[in-house]
Amino acid sequence: MTNNLLPLATDNLAHLAGAVAIVVAGLATLALVAVLHLLRRRDREAAQREIAELARLQAETAGRLDAMATLLAGGQADLHRAVNERLDSVTHHLSQSMSTTRQQTAESLARLGERLAVIDGAQKNITDLASQVTSLQSVLSNKQQRGAFGQARMEIIVRDSLPKDCYQFQFTLSNRCRPDCAIFLPDQCPLIIDAKFPLEAVTAFREAKADDERKQAAARVRLDVARHVADIADKYLIPGETQDLALMFVPSESVYADLHDSFDDLLQKAFRSRVVIVSPSLLMLAVQVIQSIQKDARMREAADRIQAEVGHLMDDLKRLYERVLRLQQHFGQANEDVRQILISAEKVEKRGTRIKDVEFDDAEEPASNVIPAPVARKLTTGD
């Protein structure tokens, strides 16, 4: 728009200058006609006066026209300069606006790239999680793989909390049965943990939609879990050899929650059979309690040795105290000897000063002021 204003203003000024030239030419023609007319009617002197007046008017008109032309030229220059300044300002603002827009666009694209990278990472994590869930479903659908999965989770929990000599996997009992894990308590009677759980009935119960299907699945859950609890009680609860309780490990918190919410009577029946159904978190808690029991037992076993060691420590402290007292006496005697030596050195210095200055007293100092040399004291073996 500013580029179009400059040619338009220049054209207007050119037209105005042409009009001024036409006016000047017309005035000159009128002046010439008037002169000819006056030469015909008046005398020569009057004509000359008129010519002089016309010449003066023509000169004034020419001066005014020149001033007007100069003013128009200045106005044209000012207009041209203003148009150029406006054009430069608009160009500068346009350049700044384009630079700011370009920078903002680059920042927006960078943020968009970061968001896309985050979205790609999240999508990758979701894909990995979906594959893990699929693999977990395949594991849980296979009975042998599900048993290995529960065994692995149980072993991880036990290994992370107990020392190696406090447990054993696939321990063989006197009846030739081999439980999944046996944790040895201070009385050497193992606590048995079974990691196998009948998941098919629970899965059918969770997937049932109709009431009849749900009732049938619930009955199957009670039957399968009760049978498994009875097997654990018959195989792993041996009087005098194992603990009075056994643990049945459920490797899923959600499955345990379903059992607790919908089959509380089944949990109570299992407890009455001396089989406790535990989830991973409850197994962790039980293992921590067992760890505390074993630590207390070791502390009780070591109580006599600790008491004997404390007695020896007290004897050592007593001997140390006696030796510190003897050392303190030695330091006191050494300080006294040093004090006597300093007194003797001071007297020797005074006597040497008098000898140097040839100043002798007539009366000698009494012999009682002489300090006897310290007698060396024999140290005993204890010192």
Image (cartoon, rainbow, N blue to C red):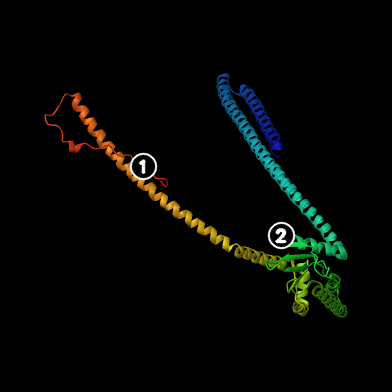
Classify the position of the N terminus by image quarter. Answer: top right
Residue occupying the point 86% across, 77% down: 220
Q: Quadrant of residue 217?
A: bottom right
**x and y percentages locating residue 123 in the rendered image:** 79, 54
Q: What element carries label 2?
A: helix
**Viewer-closest of 319 and 137:** 319
Density class for disc 1 (Cα within 10 Å; few <14, some 14-19, many ≥20) is few
Kind of residue indicated by mark 2: Asp
Residue at which label 2 appears? 165
Position above or below: 111 against 14: below
Q: Quadrant of residue 213?
A: bottom right
**Viewer-closest of 309 and 52:** 309
**x and y percentages locating residue 181 in the rendered image:** 77, 65
Q: How many marks?
A: 2
**Viewer-closest of 25 and 90:** 90
Q: What element carries label 1?
A: loop
Residue occupying the point 69% across, 42% down: 103
**x and y percentages locating residue 111 in the rendered image:** 71, 48
Residue 250 placement, left or right of 23: right
**Viewer-closest of 104 and 368:** 368
Position above or below: 346 against 154: above
**x and y percentages locating residue 91 in the rendered image:** 67, 37
Closer to viewer: mark 1 or mark 2: 1
Kind of residue indicated by mark 1: Lys
Residue at which label 1 appears? 378
Residue occupying the point 70% across, 41% down: 98
Q: In which quarter of the image is residue 18?
A: top right
Q: Which residue lies furthest to the left in this view?
A: 362
Of pointers 1 and 2, the one earlier in the residue sequence: 2
